[in-house]
């Protein structure tokens, strides 16, 4: 269509993503084109309750407002029931968009709880499976009856059946075979006709041609025998025509069931959101549909309930199971100020929280959207299969025609030559399986990315999976990536006769009102020692220096080197001891009381507990590991030593990180960069695969190719392993799909028979074709069992 700029269709997920000019086309035009091609586009139905309508004019206004929302295909308003039903493109207009449209014309509306788009899509898939099962059962029963009639004379002697004439047997076979063609095979004919109208050919074309040739030849031979006086008993393929349909339907049935399992991970994620939420109103607690929850609402959670939306805890405390989003089994502690996410499960306590993100803005919705986009993306390895699939059907039609002509020519004038040529042509048509080629890559990507989401690894598409298995160098950012991003007290050096606890007690009392990360670390260290902190008065934060206050009627200063001048102390006081602490990568705080230096406190960020094991594992698997950081060299080298990294580049600006990654790439390395901050975004983009950890900023997550929702660094080797495993499955699928067709097409064409061997009967050819595509899907489903090794 001229106004369509991009069209991406995924065979496995049965989704299309279109970019078009809305000034020239409407969703209705697009859906009409899809229907014209012989396919059924999926749409969502949204039901709204409308208040305030009084006449037909009101009805027309609401219908026009709804129809004007981008993504709405059709809107219908019922004045008597005061409801509106909007048909929207799947994943298009959201319920809040529709509610806003109604409100814009002066009416109040609310969503009516009903079947969600995901549930509706699932019900459509179930209905298709039921239809395929019914068609297959009918074709199998009729095909078995046809085979029994074909062997009637043998069965008659064994089972003492009544004698039937050849004409009666042929008439019965014609009747049953016609029932299969008209009833069970109709879906193939409809699809083949739709393709023919658009000058195309596909799998349905091959099946329809194969079964039609077998049926039509048998029909002509049967009519000739019935109406020609001297006709000999014909060789017919009614049973083959019926069993071809039965086996192809069986393959489609098994394939549909298996494909439902490939999207199970995304369906499970989408189903985590509850249908209702408990909202605190002035009149009390009310249960409202999830679509009616707005940002800023106060929600109430009880033990065992699932969170409906994202938010911030206001009061109460609990533990929340976030494993569905992060892959981490340990429940997370939640207290006032903590962030919580929709789709997670409240375990032990009750709490209230304020909604900060609802609907498509929640983390869960973002994850589902990201995974669906990833599953819809093509991998470069798929391009060969796409090119072959594009010419596959015409080639098979040519091979079938050539085989027919050759066998008819070689056997010209001999009895049964035409029947043999027809049998060979039918076998060629039905044995070919472009479906296996089409499913080889997308099913593996779909299952692989879905399994990754279950493990807290959000991988943005097949191209990323392919690049992951080529990585040979992993570079880590330091703060917040390799480290916790929280400072801890590592050393306390009292001066003179002051004990350690005295130094820590005065420092913590002064920092109790501070928001600085170093100050919070000092307070936490004092609490861990069980120290009682005296009250600090006349507190004053000294920008860039530290804090000043009075503790127990003594003037106290706590801060970095600049605090010394504020406390009238020389800048080089305890210079050697300070230098030693800094050489160990520690940040130094000076604690001054009444003009005397009480002591020094050394603080540092801590390596994440899993970091050393992750680095050891990567190096054991042959990866080169490096650390890139903007921090000073001393703390960078200390962290590197603790993590087991030998290659360190420190004091880097964001542009320097990009240059370092580019230098490795120019040297032939394939680089993965792991980071979490805004300053990491350029390096994440430059690297072959950018990996953002769970606490990453929105900018880093957007720039990254892989997001670790849990923040556990074990996700780095896990994502590398998942990429390698998925690519191995894709290669196996492609080898099988190509190998199957290359091996069986010559056999179906009679290559073995020409050398004195057997022919491939059409019904066995159909069974082999059905098994081929199903085997590809089942092989992809093995990825559901992927488990990263420690």
Image (tube, rainbow, N blue to C red):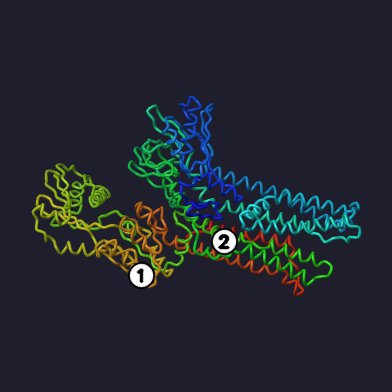
**Percent x, y for residue 645?**
34, 67
* First in sequence: mark 1 vs mark 2: 2
In this rendering, position of residue 633 left or right of residue 542: right
Q: Which mark is residue 116?
A: none
- Label 1 environment density (alpha carbons within 10 Å; few <14, some 14–19, many ≥20): some
* Residue in the foreground of this view, choosing between 287 and 520: 287
The spot of residue 332 in percent (x, y) is 39, 47
x and y percentages locating residue 329 in the rendered image: 44, 51
* Residue in the image at 14% along x and 44% along y: 552
Taking the spot 45% from the left edge, 56% from the top edge, the residue there is 460
- Comparing 383 with 393, the one in front is 393
| Residue found farthest to the top | 54
270 relative to 626, above or below: above
Q: Nearer the viewer, residue 753 or 565?
A: 753
- Residue 696 visible in the current orientation: yes
| Corner quadrant of residue 347 | top left
Nearer to us in this view, 91 or 716: 91
Up the image or down, 192 lies above or below 655; here it is above
Residue at the limit of the structure toward the bottom, as seen here: 755
The residues bearing labels 1 and 2 have C-alpha atoms spaced at a distance of: 33 Å
Image quadrant in which you'd find residue 583: bottom left
Query: In the drawing, what numbered circle is on residue 440?
Result: 2
Locate residue 539 relative to residue 688 in the image: left or right. left
Image x and y of residue 458, in percent: 44, 55
Q: Are marks 1 and 2 in contact (CB under 8 Å)?
A: no
User: Dot 1 corresponds to which residue?
Assistant: 664
Local secondary structure at mark 1: helix
The structure residue drawn at horizontal position 43% and vertical position 34%, both measured from the top left corner, is: 278
């Amino acid at each position: 269509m001229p106004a369509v700029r991009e069209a991406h269709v995924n065979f496995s997920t049965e989704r299309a993503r279109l970019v078009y000019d809305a000034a020239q086309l409407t969703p209705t035009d697009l859906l009409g084109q899809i229907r014209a091609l012989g396919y059924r586009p999926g749409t969502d139905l949204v039901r709204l309750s409308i208040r305030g309508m009084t006449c037909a004019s009101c009805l027309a206004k609401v219908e026009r407002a709804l129809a004007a929302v981008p993504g709405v295909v059709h809107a219908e308003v019922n004045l008597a029931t005061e409801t509106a039903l909007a048909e929207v493109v799947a994943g298009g207009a959201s319920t809040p968009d529709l509610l806003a449209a109604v409100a814009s014309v002066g009416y109040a509306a609310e969503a009516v709880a009903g079947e969600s788009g995901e549930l509706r899509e699932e019900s459509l898939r179930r209905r298709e499976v039921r239809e395929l099962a019914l068609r297959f059962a009918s074709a199998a029963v009729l095909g078995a009856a046809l085979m029994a009639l074909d062997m009637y004379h043998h069965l008659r002697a064994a089972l003492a059946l009544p004698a039937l004439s050849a004409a009666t047997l042929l008439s019965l076979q014609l009747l049953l075979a016609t029932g299969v063609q008209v009833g069970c095979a109709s879906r193939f004919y409809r699809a083949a006709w739709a393709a023919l109208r658009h000058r195309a050919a596909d799998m349905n074309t091959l099946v329809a041609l194969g079964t039609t040739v077998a049926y039509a030849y048998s029909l002509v031979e049967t009519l000739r025998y019935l109406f020609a006086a001297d006709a000999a008993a014909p060789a017919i393929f009614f049973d083959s025509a019926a069993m071809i349909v039965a086996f192809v339907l069986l393959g489609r049935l098994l394939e549909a069931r298996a494909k439902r399992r490939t999207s199970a991970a995304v369906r499970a994620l989408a189903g985590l959101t509850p249908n209702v939420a408990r909202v605190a109103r002035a009149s009390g607690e009310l249960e409202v549909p999830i679509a009616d929850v707005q940002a800023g609402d106060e929600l109430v959670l009880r033990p065992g309930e699932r969170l409906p939306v994202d938010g911030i805890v206001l009061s109460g405390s609990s533990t929340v199971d976030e494993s569905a989003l992060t892959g981490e089994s340990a429940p997370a502690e939640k207290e006032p100020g903590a962030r919580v996410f929709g789709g997670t499960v409240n375990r032990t306590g009750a709490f209230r929280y304020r909604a900060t993100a609802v609907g498509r803005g929640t983390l869960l919705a973002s994850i589902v959207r990201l995974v669906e986009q990833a599953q819809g993306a093509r991998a470069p390895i798929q391009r060969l299969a796409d090119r072959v699939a594009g010419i596959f059907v015409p080639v098979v039609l040519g091979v079938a025609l050539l085989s027919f002509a050759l066998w008819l020519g070689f056997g010209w004038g001999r009895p049964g030559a035409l029947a043999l040529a027809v049998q060979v042509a039918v076998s060629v048509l039905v044995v070919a399986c472009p479906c296996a080629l089409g499913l080889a890559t997308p099913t593996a990507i779909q299952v692989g990315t879905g399994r990754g989401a279950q493990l807290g690894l959000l991988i943005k598409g097949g191209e990323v999976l392919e690049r992951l298995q080529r990585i040979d160098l992993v570079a880590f950012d330091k703060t917040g990536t390799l480290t916790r991003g929280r400072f801890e007290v590592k050393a306390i050096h009292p001066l003179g006769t002051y004990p350690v606890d005295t130094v820590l007690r005065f420092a913590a009392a002064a920092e109790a009102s501070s928001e600085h990360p170093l100050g919070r670390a000092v307070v936490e260290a004092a609490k861990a020692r069980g120290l009682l902190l005296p009250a600090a008065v006349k507190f004053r934060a000294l920008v860039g220096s530290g804090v000043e206050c009075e503790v127990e009627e003594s003037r106290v200063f706590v801060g970095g080197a600049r605090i010394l001048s504020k406390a009238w102390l020389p800048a080089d006081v305890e210079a050697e001891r300070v230098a030693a602490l800094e050489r160990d990568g520690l940040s130094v705080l000076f604690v001054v009381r009444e003009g005397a230096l009480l002591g020094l406190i050394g603080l540092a960020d801590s390596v994440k507990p899993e970091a050393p094991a992750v680095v050891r594992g990567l190096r054991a698997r042959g990866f080169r590991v490096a650390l890139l950081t903007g921090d000073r060299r001393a703390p960078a080298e200390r962290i590197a030593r603790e993590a087991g990294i030998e290659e360190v580049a420190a004091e880097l600006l964001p542009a320097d990180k990009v240059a370092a990654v580019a230098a490795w790439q120019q040297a032939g390395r394939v680089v993965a960069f792991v980071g979490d901050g805004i300053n990491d975004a350029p390096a994440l983009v430059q690297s072959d695969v950018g990996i953002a950890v769970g606490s990453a900023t929105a900018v880093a997550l957007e720039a990254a190719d892989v997001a670790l929702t849990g923040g556990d660094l074990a996700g780095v080797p896990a994502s590398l392993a998942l990429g390698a495993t998925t690519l191995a499955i894709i290669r196996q699928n492609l080898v099988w799909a190509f190998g199957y067709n290359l091996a069986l097409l010559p056999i179906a064409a009679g290559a073995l028979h020409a050398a004195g061997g057997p022919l491939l009967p059409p019904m066995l050819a159909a069974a082999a074709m059905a098994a081929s595509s199903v085997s590809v899907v089942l092989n992809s489903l093995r990825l559901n069992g992927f488990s990263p090794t420690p």
